[in-house]
Amino acid sequence: MIRKFLSPFATGLLFLAPVLLTLILLNWLSGYLIAALGPATPLGQALGAAGMFFTPSPFAAFWAGLGMAAVLVWVIGLFVQTRFRQRLEGGLDGLIARIPVLGPLYRPLAQFVRMIGSSPGGEMSGMSVVSVSFGAHVEALALLTSPRLHDFGQGPRLLILIPTAPVPVGGGLLFVQPAHVKKVASMGVDDLAKLYVTMGTLPGPGPGSEATAK
């Protein structure tokens, strides 16, 4: 009797699981956005100060400043969609690269985000999806940042980026022996991003038997 009652419930729960996971992901992302852009944060205070030009109310000023920022992003997007895209990206990359601490962190993340967005930048085309083995029984999907080898005295190493789930624009940079890195021919960067964003719940191309040695 109980089994007959629970069976439709379990079926309905599985049917609604993608919707529930999407809502959970949006709630998780909104928490990060509120923490970064809320009125009490330095950025939120700057937006509120800008909005004071339109209204004396602190609450309304914050939203006015947020609206101004959204318009600014929209205008930048119009310029990026033109033939000036590469020039704008090059200028931004060059500016941030001069900052000692931020520069090394910014470059691989910029590569990853632009590859997902199908940026035409030539340097992005060198990144590819790879499978990295940790021991005999553990593998992880990652991005090979470039075919360049690095040697710090312990032998040649490849630099890979292992994204985080469910927000794959960050992650960990690791230097791995080339023998432990295999290209995954069946997956593209978009496939890898979808896999991490959905926390593995979205079926799609996988490494399978098509993973080939570099």
Image (tube, rainbow, N blue to C red):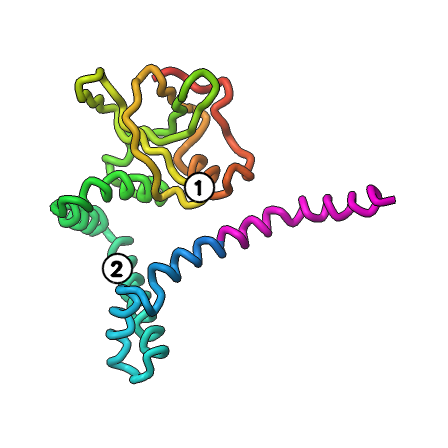
Give the answer, above or below, for where 114 lies relative to 56. above
Badge 1 local density, few (<14 within 10 Å), some, or many (20+)? some
Mark 2 lies on a secondary structure that is helix
In this rendering, position of residue 33 left or right of residue 209? left
Quadrant containing the N terminus is top right
Task: Tell me which segment is drawn in magenta.
Answer: 1-25
Tell me which amino acid carries mark 2.
Ile
Give the answer, above or below, for where 143 lies relative to 180. below
Give the answer, above or below, for where 75 lies relative to 99. below
In this rendering, position of residue 114 left or right of residue 34? left
Q: Which mark is residue 146?
A: none
User: Which residue is the site of mark 2?
Assistant: 76
Q: Earlier in the sequence, mark 1 or mark 2?
A: 2
- What percent of the width, then of the height, locates residue 16? 65, 49
Badge 2 local density, few (<14 within 10 Å), some, or many (20+)? few
Quadrant containing the C terminus is top left
Residue placed furthest toward the bottom: 56
- Give the residue drawn at x 44%, y 58%: 30
User: Which residue is the site of mark 1?
Assistant: 165
The magenta stretch spans residue 19: yes
Q: Nearer the viewer, residue 188 or 95?
A: 95
